[in-house]
Every structure is written in structure tokens, then in C-alpha cells.
Image (spheres, rainbow, N blue to C red):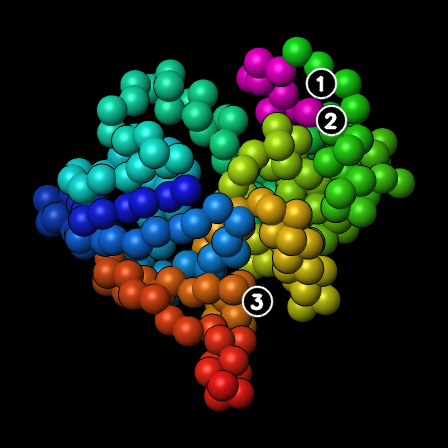
Amino acid sequence: MIVIKNLSKSYKKENAQTVKALDNVSFQIEKGEFVAIVGPSGSGKTTLMNVIGLIDVPDSGSYKLNGTEVAELGIDELAELRNKEIGFVFQQFHLLPKTSAKENVELPLIYSDRVKITGLAEDALNLVGLKERISHTTEELSGGQQQRVAIARALVNKPAIILADEPTGNLDSKSGEDIMNIFSDLNSKGITIILITHDMNIALKAKRILKIVDGKVREEKTEKDSRVVAAG
């Protein structure tokens, strides 16, 4: 599904110093995987998320999404592909205040070319266990419930990929665990999950870990993999 080869991205700071956020990165993510990209602040993981999410473009290298070379697409084509293929979940939720859960979830449908959209928001909220909160406003929901609404919003266009940036960062441990269980359940239904985090304990919930340090990516075995190797 995702093939990245020799990808690099640099930025210039205010003092004109050039910082290489991504340094000759190569990896693949297959359809239906649950992958965590983990690294400390400043490691390049946010830049990598923006590139994978078609928000930013690399300076060099190749990124193919479902066989399409992203660098060959125009702005409108990128926006269309992003809207159809990728659902985003962020640490800060980014929900509209004084607006119902249903209305927040329906927002991406404004840009959708779907002929039939009736019931899609309800279906997405049901998937994350918020069927009974459909009419509640943002202020009437807990942090964990707000993140569930954000996940439902990411799901409403039925994307193949969910790209989640520190989705448990603003939640208590119980709510964070509930959110990770939702991601695991969605993954079991065939949705590819790419999770960006600085927390290795959260990363270990994924089936595969890519660790990024100083713009370089390497693959690490998860705790689950280690147990399988030890048992074998």
C-alpha cells in the first residue's frame, strides 16, 4: 500500500541553518497492517506523518500510495486522494465547539463526492461506541469521548488508512487504553492503522514498530514478536 524509498526532507530555520528532518528513509507498509512510528520530539516523526498524509512533499526520493507516485500529482489530485484514502486523528481532537458529535463527524462529507451520505455519521459513531451520544455537543463529552468522535470523523469517508498523531497524548491511561482498543478493532476489520507516538508503551500495542531518530528510520521488533521468537 505504502512504498517509501530514499526519501529526504529538509527545512531551513530562521537562522538559515538547514535541518534534515528525514534522511534517506525507506520502508513499506502493507494493506491491513497496524504500524507504530515512534520517536522523541524533533526526531522527524511529524514530518514523516505529513508526508505520508499527503500534507507535505519530500525534497527527494519516492512515495507510492497504492502504486501511484505521489510526486506526480497536483494539489487538487493530492487533496482528492487524501480525502478518499486517509482519515486523520490528532492529539488535540480539533472538534468544533457547541456542535453535536454527529455534526462534527459529518464535516469531511462536505468535500466528499459520495452520492449517498445519509447515515454515514451515525454508522461511524456506532463503530466507536458513541451511538447514544450522537446529539451531545463537544462540551458535554469527556476527553475520551471527544477522541472517539474524532476517530468517527476520520472513518466517515471509509478510508483505507487511519493516520493517528499522538491520539492518546491528552487522555488518562484508561481512556488511552480504550482508544487503542478501538484502533485494534478497526485494524481487525481491515483498516490500515499508522500511529505516531513518542510513547513506547503505546507503540507496543501495534503489530509492528518503526523507530525514527534524527530523521532515520529503522524497524524494531515488538514485545509480541519477541515472545513469538522466544517461544519458537
Asked where in the image residue 94 lies, by quadrant, the reply is top right
Vertical placement of 87 versus 3: above or below?
above
What residue type is disc 1 on? Answer: Ile
Residue 55 location (% of width, % of height): 37, 33
Question: Marks 2 and 1: in contact by CB < 8 Å?
Answer: yes
Is 117 left, or right, of 167 in this rendering? Answer: right
Secondary element at image label 1: loop
Query: How busy is the neighbourhood of tag 2: few (under 14 within 10 Å), some, or many (20 plus)?
Result: many
Query: How busy is the neighbourhood of tag 1: few (under 14 within 10 Å), some, or many (20 plus)?
Result: some
Label 2 belongs to which residue? Answer: 120
Residue occupying the far top of the picture: 115
Quarter of the image with the N terminus is top left
Residue 116 location (% of width, % of height): 71, 14
What residue type is disc 3 on? Answer: Lys
Label 1 belongs to which residue? Answer: 117
Q: Give the CA separation, mark 1 to mark 2.
A: 6 Å
- Label located before the other in sequence (3 or 1): 1
Is 17 left, or right, of 37 in this rendering? Answer: left
Q: Which mark is residue 205?
A: 3
Q: Give the CA separation, mark 3 to mark 1.
A: 33 Å
- Looking at the picture, tell me which residue is in the foreground, 171 or 75: 75
